Amino acid sequence: GDSVTQMEGPVTLSEEAFLTINCTYTATGYPSLFWYVQYPGEGLQLLLKATKADDKGSNKGFEATYRKETTSFHLEKGSVQVSDSAVYFCALSDRQGGSEKLVFGKGTKLTVNP
Amino acid sequence: GAGVSQTPSNKVTEKGKYVELRCDPISGHTALYWYRQSLGQGPEFLIYFQGTGAADDSGLPNDRFFAVRPEGSVSTLKIQRTERGDSAVYLCASSLTGQGTDTQYFGPGTRLTVL
């Protein structure tokens, strides 16, 4: 079945550092791709998404580009802030089984120090 | 507007007991999903409703798990004869139509602990 693999954490950075969190996927069709974020004590919320190849999703300074040739959707931010500390989940929508359920990676915990 | 709400936020029960977890989706959303998140893992799909019907229940681990959505809005996840391995955070999400490009909006989750 479809699957998502994202880089193992935890990741610890200093404020204003560059962030990359790698995500690759396996899918039989043409899924939509998502990054969700979970801030401490809060629920999962959508950070950005891309629905077809070469699309770039962006939000709050984060970006990710849907690369079909490398089956990747890496998350990047040029200058992280302490408030970006959270767990980040890469996910794809899986159309198998008649539903558009999300298949998630294991998550990457990011800590940004001042 | 109001987001997805889930009750209770925490549930502690004893092995063998029956539990019900409730999800109230965003008003007007026809699609509703249940996921389960174990510690250190990403959420795993359990069941998907389109309106009142369970369109995909392929993620339910066994027949102790059951979910309903009788009026196409609120959903209840029911777990019979709970086991310690059922301990996890149960997440509910809703989306407007259920299409793959739709954003799924998640509730805060119910943390279930089976002693």
Image: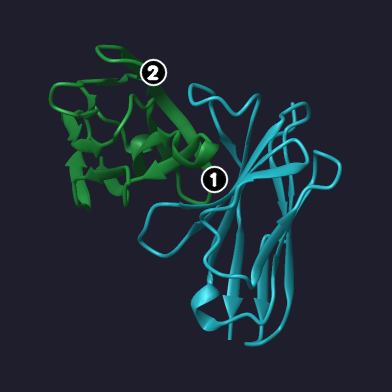
Chain colours: A green, B cyan
Q: Position of residue B24 (x, y in %)?
A: 76, 44
- Identify which residue is drawn at 24% across, 38% down: A26
Q: Is residue A93 left or right of residue B21?
A: left
Q: Residues within 10 Å of mark 2 (few under 14, many from 20)?
A: some
Mark 2 or 1, closer to the camera: 2
Q: In this picture, is B19 found above or below A3?
A: below
Q: Which of the two residues, A37 or B67, is positioned nearer the viewer here?
A: B67
Query: How many marks are shown on the rendered structure?
Result: 2
Q: Label 1: chain?
A: A
Q: Is residue A84 left or right of residue B44?
A: left
Residue marked by disc 2: A51
Q: Position of residue A73 (x, y in %)?
A: 24, 28
Q: In this picture, is B90 found above or below B64?
A: above
2 or 1: tag closer to the N-terminus: 1
Residue type, mark 2 in image: Thr
Q: Quadrant of the C terminus of chain B?
A: bottom right
Q: Position of residue B87 (x, y in %)?
A: 53, 73
Residue A51 visible to the viewer: yes
Residue A86 visible to the viewer: no
Label 2: state its secondary structure: loop
Q: Position of residue B96 (x, y in %)?
A: 66, 25
- Identify which residue is drawn at 22% across, 53% down: A10
Q: Residues within 10 Å of mark 1 (few under 14, many from 20)?
A: some
- Identify which residue is drawn at 32% across, 49% down: A107
Q: Which of the two residues, B60 or B8, is positioned nearer the viewer here?
A: B60
Q: Label 2: chain?
A: A
Cα–Cα span, label 2 and label 1: 23 Å
